[in-house]
Image (tube, rainbow, N blue to C red):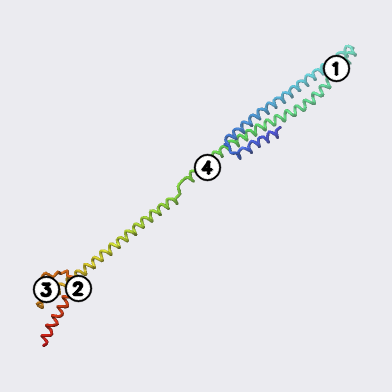
């Protein structure tokens, strides 16, 4: 009986944690089943011990009957009634046979009752042990649930890689914008330098025109007042050619 009970206990605690059910429910059910089984075993133990006690009472009663018949047989012999004494002794022998059988049965019942007591006591210890194990398993289950929830929360958190990618994109845009601004600045500087070179060319032309006019005034070849300072270059060259002819002509007459 005890072996069957222990096998049942092992089956309770060996089956539940592998199925897709709540371990708390499984452990509570196992505890409930153990308590029910223990209650039934206690009832059986009470029945066995009660039977032992009844056998003990029967043996005591038979022993009293045997003793009483023995005393009556002795009293009959003292009174000289040998026939009555013989009858009482025969009756006593029948009770003694019943008493012997009852004593053998009682011995077996006493041994069984003691085994049942030990089994019940051991069963109670095992129930306390399994209850403590159930509490420990529940605590582990709670810890596993908390750890699992924490892992889920951690997995749901954003990673620095996403942030780094965003920073990289922003950095690239900023660098591109700076490069674009630098390019525009270079283009702007080029335009300014071009305008400055044009301005220098214009100033050179004006200076050359002024010097030419001064030379013409010195030679008595004043240019028309209406001549534009900003005359085209080909007109200036034509004027210069005429000036060379004049100067050349004057030089020739002086030499002659």
Reading the image, the residue beneath label 4 is: 148
Q: Which mark is residue 234?
A: 2
Residue 43, by quadrant, is: top right
Q: Could you tell me which secondary element the residue under label 3 belongs to?
A: loop
Of callouts 3 and 1, the N-terminal one = 1
Reading the image, the residue beneath label 1 is: 91
Real-space Cα distance between discs 4 and 2? 93 Å
* In this rendering, position of residue 28 left or right of residue 176: right
Residue at (13, 85) in percent of width and height? 252
Residue at (49, 46) in percent of width and height? 155
Of callouts 3 and 2, the N-terminal one = 3
Q: Work out whether 139 lies above or below 50.
A: below
In depth, the one of 94 and 16 nearer the eye is 16
* In this rendering, position of residue 38 left or right of residue 244: right
- Whether the residues at callouts 3 and 2 have beta carbons within 8 Å, the answer is no
Q: Nearer the viewer, mark 3 or mark 4?
A: 3
Reading the image, the residue beneath label 3 is: 223
Q: Could you tell me which secondary element the residue under label 2 belongs to?
A: helix
User: Where does the image place residue 54, in percent across and percent down from the top left?
Assistant: 74, 22
Q: Nearer the viewer, mark 2 or mark 1?
A: 2
Of callouts 2 and 1, the N-terminal one = 1
Q: Nearer the viewer, mark 4 or mark 2?
A: 2
Real-space Cα distance between discs 3 and 2? 16 Å
Of callouts 4 and 2, the N-terminal one = 4
Figure quadrant of the N terminus: top right
């Amino acid at each position: 009986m005890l072996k069957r009970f222990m096998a049942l206990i092992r089956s309770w605690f060996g089956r539940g944690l592998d199925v897709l059910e709540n371990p708390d429910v499984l452990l509570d059910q196992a505890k409930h089943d153990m308590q029910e089984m223990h209650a039934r075993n206690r009832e059986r133990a009470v029945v066995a011990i009660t039977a032992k006690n009844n056998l003990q009472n029967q043996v005591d009663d038979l022993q009293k009957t045997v003793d009483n018949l023995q005393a009556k047989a002795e009293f009959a012999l003292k009174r000289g009634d040998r026939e009555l004494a013989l009858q009482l002794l025969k009756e006593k022998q029948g009770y003694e046979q019943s008493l012997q059988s009852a004593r053998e049965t009682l011995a077996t019942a006493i041994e069984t009752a003691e085994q049942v007591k030990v089994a019940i006591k051991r069963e109670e210890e095992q129930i306390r042990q399994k209850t403590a194990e159930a509490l420990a398993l529940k605590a582990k289950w709670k810890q596993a649930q908390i750890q699992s929830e924490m892992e889920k929360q951690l997995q749901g958190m954003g990673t620095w890689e996403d942030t780094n990618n965003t920073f990289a994109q922003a950095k690239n845009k900023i660098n591109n914008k700076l490069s674009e601004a630098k390019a525009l600045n270079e283009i702007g500087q080029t335009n300014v330098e071009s305008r400055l070179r044009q301005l220098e060319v214009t100033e050179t032309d004006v200076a050359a025109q002024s010097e030419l006019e001064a030379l013409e005034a010195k030679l008595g070849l004043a240019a028309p007042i209406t001549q534009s300072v900003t005359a085209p270059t080909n007109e200036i060259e034509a004027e210069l050619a005429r000036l060379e002819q004049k100067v050349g002509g004057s030089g020739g007459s002086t030499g002659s």
